[in-house]
Amino acid sequence: MLQNGDQAPNFTGKDQYGKVVSLADFKGKKLVLYFYPKDDTPGCTKEACNLRDNYNEMMEKGFAILGVSPDDEQSHQRFANKYALPFPLLSDPELKIIKAYGAWGEKNMYGKKYEGLLRTTFIINEEGIINKVIRKVKTDDHTNQILKLYN
């Protein structure tokens, strides 16, 4: 399980427009790397829209934002267009990035256990070191949850 102070695992993936994105692209910036289960579902939409609504403030404070889920590029493109999301969403259907960050594991819903994506956010510093890990994400107030860690 990744923790504060760990080197962030390198990754490369394609965003909603087929553009290749890697961790190296964010060197010199603080990166909000957030993992979410599924495009256009209630919690994931709240989280993405909260980050969208506060995007300019996040940029002013030196943060870049990158979402990752198992959905394909076309699903990400529909989701990003529908909600005017200004940040890239990486497609990870093979779960390579998701598992490298430990965002895949056992979930429990209504007493039924299954494997799935664990909603998690990593704040990675300018040198590629994990500064903060948020495992209990507040989907409708995620920006404040992130910014409070730096005040």
Image: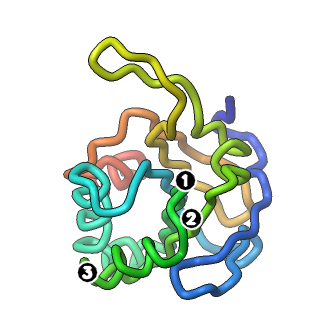
The quarter of the displayed image where residue 4 is located: top right
Judged from the image, the secondary structure of the residue bearing numbered disc 1 is strand
- Say which of 131 and 88 sits in front: 88
Q: What mark, if any, has residue 42 been given in the picture?
A: none
Say if mark 3 contacts mark 1, CB within 8 Å: no
The quarter of the displayed image where residue 72 is located: bottom right
Q: CA distance from mark 3 to mark 1?
A: 26 Å
**Residue depth check, mark 3 versus mark 1: number of the one nearer the observer:** 3
Q: Position of residue 134 (x, y in %)?
A: 46, 39
Single out the residue that lies furthest toward the top: 111
Residue type at numbered disc 2: Leu
Q: Position of residue 81 (x, y in %)?
A: 32, 84
Q: Which residue is mark 3?
A: 82
Judged from the image, the secondary structure of the residue bearing numbered disc 3 is helix
The quarter of the displayed image where residue 111 is located: top left
Q: How is the image coloured?
A: rainbow
Q: Which residue is mark 1?
A: 123
Say if mark 1 contacts mark 2, CB within 8 Å: yes
- Say which of 103 and 141 sits in front: 103
Q: Which residue is mark 2?
A: 31
Judged from the image, the secondary structure of the residue bearing numbered disc 2 is strand
Residue drawn at (49%, 55%), measured in percent from left and top? 34
- Say which of 140 and 117 sits in front: 117
- Say which of 57 and 78 sits in front: 78
